[in-house]
Amino acid sequence: MDFKEKMDFYVHMVNDALEQMLGLDDSEQKKVREAMRYSLLAGGKRLRPVLSLAVCDALDGDIEQVLPFACATEMIHTYSLIHDDLPSMDNDDYRRGRLTNHKVFGEAMAILAGDGLLNYAYEVMLDYVCKNRDNIYAKIEAMRIIAKFSGIDGMIGGQVVDLECEGKHISPELLEYMHRHKTGALIKAPVLAAAAICNASPEQKASLEKYAGNLGLAFQIRDDILDVEGNVEEMGKSAGKDKAKNKSTFVTFYGLDKSKEMLHQITAEAIDSLAVFGEKGCFLRQLAEYLVTRNN
Ligand code: GRG
């Protein structure tokens, strides 16, 4: 399979699993489920779960064991997008090519749908672990990683720095810290969770941690660039928000050309750290290359 076919294969696997995990029902909770499904099943690149599945393949692991954890990271990612779009946060009207959750379901329901997805992520993982107790310590470690990297020392912590720095001049170190946490942490989580479940060696884990750390930073730099020169239709969300909110980004700090140079450099470093995987790291390498030129 070439890169595109493999990517489609993983994305389909994730979409089918998510659809199965969060079906519609006719209970009292029909409305909140509908709101959760609205954002979760709205598409998106599925980068985080795809990373888990690709790491699993690079380590010759068992995809069935990794899939619930991969899907859980997509649920957590989607909750963060719903909350990030709220009027009290970024106040966005479009996401994933459609109206944001609060525009359709109202602010209160959007908050609950986000909370619901965050909680559901842990329900899905714990449900799976309780029913499949083999390799249990690795699975618990994977959940610990996901909790840690999405919490105050990870994604939420990065978002707090972002909020506090709006309209202020910040140091390049703090800018990198913010990006590595706000976005990078939830890119590291699926990589390291899959590595734990597939019993990666310490050397493999260290390589993957470097890969994911640099990939996450590169991903956010590309996001900063797209906010300036991206096409709204292709992105499925609004552009120009960083400038409007006077946010510090790689582009406001270093300018477009230097940001692009840094994007290439950091991606090359991510790719270099996969040397230990040889041929098995091929998809992960191609994924890093694809993210440099992504338009959404
Ligand atoms: C708890 C109130 C409350 C809010 C939480 C944690 C949080 C808000 C926000 C997280 C920060 C965040 C949304 C960072 C943005 C990261 C980013 C670049 C998202 C876009 O990811 P893509 O491009 O999106 O992978 P798709 O739609 O393709 O999945």
Image (spheres, rainbow, N blue to C red):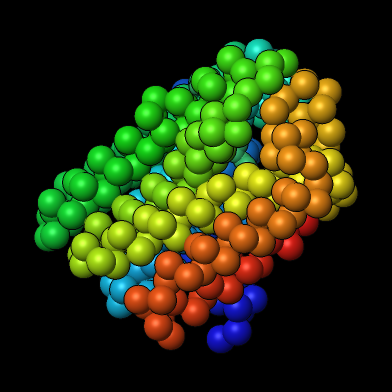
Residue 95 is situated, as x and y percent measured from the top left of the image, at 72, 38
Q: Quadrant of residue 133?
A: bottom left
Can residue 26 be seen from the camera position used here?
Answer: no
Q: Quadrant of residue 290?
A: bottom right
Q: Is residue 3 above or below residue 48?
A: below
Q: Quadrant of residue 65?
A: bottom left
Residue 89 is situated, as x and y percent measured from the top left of the image, at 65, 18
Residue 149 is situated, as x and y percent measured from the top left of the image, at 38, 38
Q: Residue at the spot x=35%, y=68% of the render?
A: 56
Q: Nearer the viewer, residue 105 or 62?
A: 62
Residue 287 is situated, as x and y percent measured from the top left of the image, at 57, 68
Answer with left or right where residue 2 lies relative to residue 58.
right
Where, quadrant-wise, is the N terminus in this rendering?
bottom right
Q: Is residue 44 above or below residue 176?
A: below
Q: Residue at the spot x=58%, y=73% of the render?
A: 286
Quarter, ligand 1: top right
Answer with left or right where residue 70 lies relative to residue 60.
right
Q: Is residue 137 above or below residue 284?
A: above
Can residue 125 be seen from the camera position used here?
Answer: yes
Q: Nearer the viewer, residue 233 or 231?
A: 231
Q: Residue at the spot x=83%, y=23% of the render?
A: 244
Q: Residue at the spot x=48%, y=70% of the render?
A: 272
Numbered marks: total: 0
